[in-house]
Amino acid sequence: MFDLFSKKKEDGTRSLIWAHRGASAYAPENSLLAFEKAAELGADGVELDVQLTKDNVLVVTHDEKINRVTDREGFVKDYTYEELLDMNFNAGKKKFGKVKIPTLKEVYELLKPSNLTINVEIKSGVFFYEGIEKMCLDLTREMGLEDRVLYSSFNHYTVKKMKELDSTVKTGLLYADGIIDIASYAKEKTNCDALHPALYNIQYPGYMEEAKKNGLDVNVWTVNEKEYMKMCAKAKVNAIITNYPDVALDIAKKY
């Protein structure tokens, strides 16, 4: 079975490369095209965002509002799945024509034949989306992808709840600005498996050492500049989350 953590830092192998919202530098973010491109470019995994529609369908899109990625306005939660299908989710990349919003199941179906890790970010920070955690777990089990999926969220209650629902799932704690003693907090409060910090957090003295001490992998977002890809690779982070998986892969192979 595919092991999310098969390329561990301890054995000297390179950092993994996870395509942020798919290979979003080259195709509309969070689209099936972007996930296909990520696989084509040799990414080790993909990161995606999941929300619930008005009729409780798990769809893959980042913003709570559709304004930035479509030519329409409003919140994802206020539209049915069928209504969202009428919209163009090409995120301003007009050469791709009309791009439909994918369901999480469609992404799973697309990536199941691969060995890519799938980092599902649950977007429950603004709207709590009652039941979304269990829905994600149930779908993952239904698709037989339990050993390939890692769940993350900026809502730390959601990260904790995932472990309460199933202690065997892999989870990551998303956060932006520096939190004192984040590794201990993450482990004690959420029992998570990984830290998902914004890039600049790995600069703090002892950061990587504290993560390792607490048994936490470090998966860094969103690393799009070569100098920072190099910094992450040299630090031996577990995964670099980037819009440019091909560029990051070339750099990671050198460390």
Image (tube, rainbow, N blue to C red):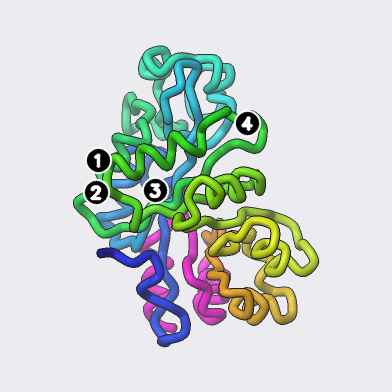
Q: Earlier in the sequence, mark 4 or mark 2?
A: 2
| Label 2 secondary element | loop
Q: Nearer the viewer, residue 38 or 166?
A: 166
Residue 109: give its label: 1
Q: Earlier in the sequence, mark 3 or mark 2?
A: 3
Residue type pointed to by label 2: Lys
How far apart are labels 4 and 2 at the CA level?
28 Å
At 46% across and 80% down in the image, what residue appears? 9
Where 55 sits versus 192, above or below? Answer: above
Q: Where does label 3 land, which residue?
A: 22
What is the magenta range? Answer: 226-255
- From the viewer's perspective, tell me whether residue 237 is left or right of residue 125: left
Q: Earlier in the sequence, mark 3 or mark 4?
A: 3
| Label 4 secondary element | loop
How far apart are labels 3 and 4 at the CA level?
24 Å
Crowd band around label 2 with a 10 angstrom C-alpha radius: few (<14), some (14–19), many (20+): some
Q: Where does label 2 land, which residue?
A: 112
The quadrant of the rendering that contains the N terminus is bottom left
Q: Where does label 4 land, which residue?
A: 128
At 71% across and 81% down in the image, what residue appears? 206
Where 164 sits versus 248, above or below? Answer: above
Residue type pointed to by label 4: Phe
How far apart are labels 1 and 4 at the CA level?
26 Å
**Given contact means CB atoms under 8 Å apart, are the residues at marks 3 and 4 in contact?**
no
The quadrant where residue 19 appears: bottom left
Crowd band around label 1 with a 10 angstrom C-alpha radius: few (<14), some (14–19), many (20+): few
Q: Nearer the viewer, residue 16 or 149?
A: 149
